[in-house]
Image (cartoon, grey):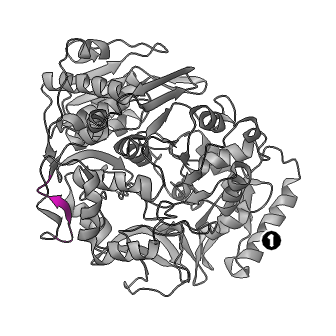
Amino acid sequence: MSDYHSIFQHSIQSPQAFWQKAAEDIVWQKPFECVLDTTEAPFYRWFRGGMLNTCDNMVDRHVREGFGAQAAIIYDSPLTEVQKTISYQQLQNDVAILAGALKAQGVKKGDRVIIYMPMVPEAVYAMLACARIGAVHSVVFGGFSAKELASRIDNSGAAFIFSASCGLEPGRVINYKQLLDDAIDIATQPVNNCVILQRPQAPCTLIAERDIDWQEFIRNAQPAECEPVAATDPLYILYTSGTTGKPKGIVRDNGGHAVAMRWTMKNLYNVSPGEVYWAASDIGWVVGHSYIVYAPLLNRNTTILYEGKPVGTPDAGAFWRVISEHKVSAMFTAPTALRAIKKEDPHGELVKQYDISCLKNQFLAGERSDPDTIAWAQTHLKVPVIDHWWQTETAWAIATNPLGIEEFPIKPGSATLPAPGYHLQVLDSDGTPLPADTLGNLAVKLPLPPGTFPTIWGDQQRMYDNYLATYPGYYLTGDSGIIDSDGYVHVMSRIDDVINVAAHRLSTGQMEESLCRHPDVAEAAVFGIADDFKGELPLGLAILNNNCHRPHDEILRELIAGVRNDIGAVASFKLVAIVARLPKTRSGKILRATMRKIANQEEYAMPATIDDPEILPEIEQVLAELLKNR
């Protein structure tokens, strides 16, 4: 165990020496000429001149080093009642064949390939096959609408697509093929070939001259070797939400990404090669890219590919079953998943049915985790529950409890300390650093560390305008928060979610914490609404635990009193309602901005990422009733 503070200072004061050392864990076909290229600042590039192959580092090197028999992927699908273990040797064989089929079809280095698939091993094979030959993959979350898929086809310029006949959700089958066909009809970019994995739950009809059955595609293919690419060549494009409606393609390069991903597994997650690691996410999101696929395989871990839900497949003990059966040593999920489990099983009875003594640590990220959920998890899992903070743009944690370096006491509600490589500061609107315990905008002094995004696909000016222009020399995270006197980072909300109540800047995240502290509350959301007198007022919505049967009026009075006690009368917190559910994205983030527009009677577009559009009319009705007599 090393000293965090000395390591962190080394990473900030001597970033080139720090990351050059980390790069020694990666196999390079050609050494890099410089660690950090600053010639086009503020657009920095890492490991300029180096040549490598990411797939080689994830798969082939482990086979060469004698670990071919080790499990690389465990596929666990409660939706199909299928489990399958794939060794590193088998993974190498399957990926090499698929890569050879891609080459035979004319796909070459730099070409873009869309992957629109469910959580099945073939989706990972497709990602690695692209990396193997230097093609640039863009995974689109399976089940996204045809319009959203079409926009990503057009923006990436992809002419080749991997897909499947269907995806599965509890109780329903999603027709991917119809969505794909509709997207191709909408898109202006011609799509030459679609490789379709036929699933028995809903086989589809293929379109002649364009669609190819997956098994036919690989039947006579010759295995392809790994092709060296430049460290600065793109590995993938991952689209994230933007404010303009235009797709925002986050680019990840090969060299910096491989170095950072491997480094994080031991230093931040304290996971050693050979251990079983599980990120309960989807490959359509950045967590799935970084910690289902790339980082675990770079570190020679066994990674879990889970096609299921935290509840309903079959119950709220699903996660504990997977941990117990597959001997998971570290797990990573979103707070919303634990809140869903806590709502169904508030006393943790289902946890007791499984032996999860193999679990060393539970990690949370994706949205702010309320202290009550962390306390619930620590009580029932009996392991450290680590809330850490990062973004699609960064690919890995900006702030965390660096367990592989030095373990720090947990402060519920805090993401602990800045990760090595991130010179994080809290700035006011003018860019002046603020003192400890003062709410402001969280920004990272440039350069960002390896693995973070070097640009937005096809639109470098947009990267500058969105992230670099506000504070010259800094990356603006878009989040607000404080760094306390112990150096702990508290991410409170998106910058837009800091509300101004009678000239007092208040965090909606702190109010959500207060609501979730109530023993009957499973989950809550707070957002600001316009008010003629005070500028803005907070409005809260709360979901109750399943076993709560108390009168709602009584609970509402307690919630208002709780916020008043925790935040003060200055919050003017009086508007709160109890709801059965909250609108969320498919990755579990609450759609606060959409609800704010509904409450303010503003026009809003149906979010492309919404999990269940039918919930919005329910929310409209609740908000209208709540605001009728305010």
Q: Quick check: 66 above or below 206?
A: below
**Residue 400 at x, y = what percent?**
49, 64
Q: Which residue is mark 1?
A: 561
In which image quadrant can residue 352 be found? Answer: top right
Q: Residue at x 26, y 17 (%)?
A: 211
Residue 308 screen position, x and y as percent: 56, 31
Residue numbers of the magenta segment: 41-50
**In this view, 603 is above or below 313:** below
Side of 104 where 244 appears, left or right: right
Answer few, some or many: residues within 10 Å of disc 1's Cα (few below 14, many 20 plus, some between 14 and 19): some
> What secondary structure predominates along the stretch shown in magenta?
loop
Give the secondary structure at mark 1: helix
Q: Name the image quarter holding residue 592.
A: bottom right
Does residue 546 sit above or below 569 in this rendering? above
Q: Quadrant location of the C terminus?
A: bottom right
Tell whether position 42 is magenta: yes
Q: Please state which of residues 575 and 327 is positioned toward the viewer in this rendering.
A: 327
Is 492 left or right of 426, judged from the image as shown? right
Q: Residue at x 44, y 47 (%)?
A: 287
